Image (cartoon, helix red, strand yellow):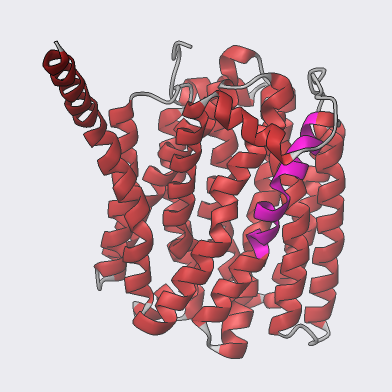
């Protein structure tokens, strides 16, 4: 697929489409509201316990279901109307968010209540995620899929840029309970958008739901596995910013609510990358190595610098590398399968991107508790840097293998 028009103009053309524009607005509102929950829950748990490890447990509870239910959630998105699947998931999340807000207003939301309801919200997210990713291609013509995928990623990172700062403001002025209520309202915006959009007829899969059907996609097309490994490295390296933002703020000598500023800077970098990448396909392997290096290197520098203003610059660069790497791999996954397989491949995407997060969250929470958040950030950056190094070394490895094969043939002769 050629790149065609790229940048802001391509993005604007796709956003002007009625159905994608409505979905973009609804998804952006819901994702922004999600940061009200994330930051409010993290701050409440941290204030109640002072435990970095429980911050990791909180993040684990949010994403654990993605790993456990991915094959069935993906098949559900391929066998049934994705818009309806997503609609019911969002309605369930709305009810849970209202319950948490009510408990917080009543003063009955302790750390385990927050973790338990977050676990339930993670269940709704596990069923929503494959449909939420796969539905995008049914809202735009085929030639605009790369732009739509980049913009869909941008919704989450636009939310990351605005949500934490707005959430910190809300928590500081109207309180944690109100932040939970705002999250509940944001789900309803996406529900309204889903009721209004029109999607192209969906080619649905048939048959039973089997894990081996999802794994067969990777066996038949090994390149898909490579893209999933890149997505996993991206999810792993982005986790310290998401999970430990309040603790990072304190490591810099500021209040825990400044964690919203850290998350916002990461999101600003990601949004800038999304605008620049709009309309582009995944690009070369060398470009992927550069963006992975930007992600991992930005996280290392953010973790090590002692000065917050400079740290915010580095975490913004980290966000740009995150978005660019994830969008490139995700676009190739979307375009590498048939329509009837898209829900399952995006469920595997969910495992790679979100499913590793529970493990990453527990690991960086444990490392932070023992050695500090700065060490945790450096350790979690290593997979992205290793991936970049492997991509750059791959041509030389292939060349060495070819020379060995040639020498072997010569010896036999």
Residue pushed farthest front? 412
Placement of 244 over or under 1, stated as above or below: below
At horizontal 62% and vertical 72% (from top left) the residue drawn is 58
At horizontal 51% and vertical 39% (from top left) the residue drawn is 228
Q: Is residue 77 magenta?
A: yes
Placement of 199 over or under 358, stated as above or below: above
Q: Is residue 360 magenta?
A: no
**Residue 13 in view:** yes
At horizontal 17% and vertical 20% (from top left) the residue drawn is 408
Q: Quadrant of residue 46?
A: bottom right
Placement of 376 over or under 264, stated as above or below: below
Q: Where residue 275 sits in the image (x, y, percent)?
A: 45, 33
Q: What range is drawn magenta here?
A: 62-78
Q: Nearer the viewer, residue 276 or 114?
A: 114
**Residue 159 in view:** no
What secondary structure is the stretch in magenta mostly built from?
A: helix
Q: Where residue 248 sits in the image (x, y, percent)?
A: 41, 73
- Give the quadrant of the C terminus: top left
Looking at the image, residue 269 sits to the left or right of residue 397; the answer is right
What is the number of callouts on the image?
0
Looking at the image, residue 397 sits to the left or right of residue 23; the answer is left
Q: Where residue 158 sits in the image (x, y, percent)?
A: 54, 46
């Amino acid at each position: 697929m050629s790149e065609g028009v790229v940048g802001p103009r391509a993005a604007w053309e796709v956003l002007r489409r009625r159905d994608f524009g409505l979905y973009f607005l609804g998804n952006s509102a819901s994702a922004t509201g999600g940061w009200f929950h994330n930051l409010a829950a993290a701050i409440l748990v941290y204030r109640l316990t002072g435990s970095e490890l429980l911050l990791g447990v909180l993040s684990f509870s949010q994403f654990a279901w993605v790993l456990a239910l991915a094959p069935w959630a993906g098949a559900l998105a391929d066998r049934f109307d994705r818009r309806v699947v997503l609609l019911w998931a969002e309605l369930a999340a709305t009810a849970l968010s209202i319950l948490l807000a009510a408990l917080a207003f009543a003063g009955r939301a302790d750390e385990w209540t927050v973790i338990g309801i977050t676990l339930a919200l993670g269940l709704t997210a596990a069923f929503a995620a494959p449909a939420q990713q796969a539905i995008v291609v049914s809202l735009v013509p085929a030639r605009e899929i790369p732009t739509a995928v980049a913009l869909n990623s941008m919704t989450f990172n636009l939310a990351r840029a605005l949500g934490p700062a707005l959430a910190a403001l809300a928590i500081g002025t109207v309180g944690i309970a109100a932040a939970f209520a705002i999250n509940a309202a944001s789900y309803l915006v996406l529900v309204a958008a889903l009721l209004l959009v029109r999607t192209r007829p969906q080619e649905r899969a048939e048959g039973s739901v089997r894990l081996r059907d999802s794994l067969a996609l990777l066996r038949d097309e090994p390149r898909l596995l490579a893209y999933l490994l890149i997505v996993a490295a991206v999810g792993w390296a982005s986790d310290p910013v998401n999970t430990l933002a309040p603790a990072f703020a304190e490591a810099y000598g500021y209040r825990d609510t400044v964690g919203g500023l850290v998350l916002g800077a990461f999101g600003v970098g990601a949004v800038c990358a999304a605008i620049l990448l709009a309309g582009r396909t995944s690009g070369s392997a060398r470009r992927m190595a550069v963006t992975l290096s930007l992600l991992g290197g930005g996280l290392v520098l953010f973790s090590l610098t002692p000065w917050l203003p400079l740290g915010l610059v580095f975490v913004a660069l980290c966000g740009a590398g995150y978005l660019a790497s994830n969008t490139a791999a995700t676009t190739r996954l979307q375009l590498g399968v048939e329509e009837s397989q898209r829900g399952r491949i995006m469920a595997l995407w969910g495992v790679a991107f979100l499913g590793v997060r529970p493990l990453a969250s527990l690991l960086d929470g444990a490392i932070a508790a023992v050695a500090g958040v700065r060490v945790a950030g450096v350790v979690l950056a290593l997979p992205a840097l290793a991936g970049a190094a492997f991509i750059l070394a791959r041509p030389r490895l292939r060349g060495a293998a070819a020379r060995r094969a040639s020498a072997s043939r010569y010896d036999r002769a």
